[in-house]
Image (cartoon, rainbow, N blue to C red):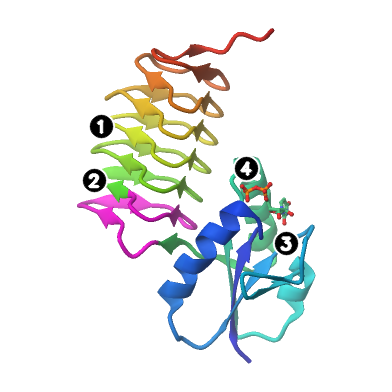
Amino acid sequence: MTRLVGVYGASGCGRGIMPLLRAELGGSEGQLVFIDDAPQADRVNGHEVWSFDRFLGAPATSRHAALAVANSRVRETLDRRCTEAGIALIGARAANIVIMDEVEIGAGALLSPFVTLTSNIRIGRCFHANLYSYVEHDCVIGDYVTFAPGVHCNGNATIGDHAYVGSGAIIRQGMRIGAGATIGMGAVITKDVPEGVTVVGNPARPMEMR
Ligand code: UDP
């Protein structure tokens, strides 16, 4: 019997998380596999790709999964599926991230290399902070929020559940980003963004549908 750890999602996001978990778990006893519901291969980057049922059925002393899918709605569904099956969430943190004082982070956060979280920050469940993103002081971030690489989130910002912030976006201090909002790549947020709205550009404006 062994400790089983799965990276759920064997695509781009999962392949970026697997090496972080492997480094964190080091030589500790256990097996590290991908879990995928529509696998493209039996092995990916040296790790077996298992179905959810195989992961659940294999003899193990404990089961943990990192939810490595960028789509936040999928993460929420997988979170529920894992919780109901008794699989605990596991987070992953690159060795070189910086986390300062009084930072509360919910279960399952995936923090990629060069991420910085400064002080007095609250973050919900299953946060993804991709390469080089930062979160400055006093921000409050909801559940299932996704930062693509290089997000600059300045202090006192509030970000609702399921918001997606594109690569290189800059969020001005004190902004409020509503739940389910999408911030386009490189957008500069100088005004609050309402729930569910997609904004793009500098200064960011709601995207016009053509
Ligand atoms: N996936 C899954 N279960 C789901 C939804 C997605 O196993 O309910 C897998 C899917 O088969 C794919 C990966 O998660 O291998 C998502 O990959 P994608 O390239 O869409 O996005 P990313 O890796 O960037 O999140």
Q: Circle 2 — which element? A: loop
Residue 36: which disc?
3
Q: Are the residues at dot 1 and dot 4 in contact (C-beta closer than 8 Å)? A: no
Q: Is residue 133 left or right of residue 32?
A: left
Q: Which residue is mark 1?
A: 155
The yes-or-no answer for disc 4 within 8 Å of ligand 1 is yes
Q: Is residue 68 visible?
A: no
5 over 130 or under it: above or below: below
89 over 206 or under it: above or below: below
142 over 92 or under it: above or below: above
- Work out how far the residue at label 4 is from the one at label 2, CA to CA, in angstroms: 25 Å
- Work out how far the residue at label 3 is from the one at label 1, CA to CA, in angstroms: 37 Å
- Work out how far the residue at label 1 is from the one at label 4, CA to CA, in angstroms: 25 Å
Q: Circle 4 — which element? A: loop
Q: Are the residues at dot 2 and dot 1 in contact (C-beta closer than 8 Å)? A: yes
Q: Is residue 27 visible?
A: yes
Q: Which residue is mark 2?
A: 118
Amino acid type at circle 4 is Asn
Quadrant the C terminus occupies: top right
Earlier along the polypeptide chain: callout 2 or callout 1? 2
Q: Residue furthest bottom?
A: 1
Q: Circle 1 — which element? A: loop
Give the residue displayed 34% in from the left and 22% down from the top. 175
Front residue (pair 168, 123): 168
The magenta segment is 94-115
Residue count near mark 3 (Cα–Cα under 10 Å), binned few <14, some 14–19, many ≥20: many
Earlier along the polypeptide chain: callout 2 or callout 3? 3
Give the residue displayed 45% in from the left and 77% down from the top. 25
